[in-house]
Image (cartoon, rainbow, N blue to C red):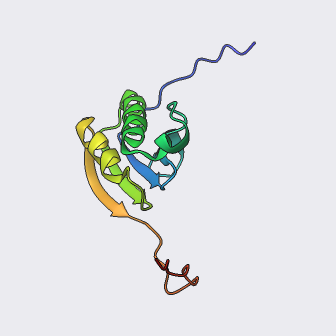
Amino acid sequence: MNNIKKTKKYIPNGIAHICVTFNTSIISISDVEGNILCWASGGSRGFKGSKKGSPFAAQVATEEVCKKVKECGMRNIEIKIQGPGAGREAALRAIASSGIRISSIQDITPLPHNGCRPRKKKRL
């Protein structure tokens, strides 16, 4: 058997990648190089169906990730948020209330330069 003791890494700075869609929210925390330290989503926290896309599910997932990351000694975080979902503000508020200092917030939602043709308008 391997008797190698796993040491905890001390990582003071990190990046929070928040992907919020209409169906779910995925929060990943990485170090500055881009190596994922921990992640959580609405589904991994026990929400099913349409509740995965709710702001409360995003808040619970973000609080869980922040708790894990604080054990690594992370104090500063840079936020990159992507997507149009309902849990954007809830995830940001959860990070702010966790005690981790937010250094920057960046919206990386892809915007089309008149790419795909949109769906037809509904006529009532």
As drawn, 2 above or below 63: above
Which residue is outermost to the front? Answer: 124
Q: In this orientation, which residue lies closer to the viewer: 60 or 28?
A: 60
User: Residue 83, percent across and down?
Assistant: 45, 61
Quarter in which the N terminus is drawn: top right
User: Residue 122, percent across and down?
Assistant: 50, 77
Determine the image quadrant of residue 74: top left
Residue at 27 percent of width and 35 percent of height: 98
User: Residue 48, percent across and down?
Assistant: 54, 36
As drawn, 71 above or below 58: above
As drawn, 98 above or below 124: above
Residue at 39 percent of width and 27 percent of height: 71
Determine the image quadrant of residue 55: top left
Which residue is outermost to the right? Answer: 1
Residue at 38 percent of width and 49 percent of height: 87
Q: In this orientation, which residue lies closer to the viewer: 54 or 39?
A: 54
Q: In this orientation, which residue lies closer to the viewer: 46 or 49?
A: 49
Q: How many marks?
A: 0
Q: Is residue 92 left or right of residue 14?
A: left
Q: Is residue 100 left or right of residue 43?
A: left
Q: In this orientation, which residue lies closer to the viewer: 71 or 17?
A: 17
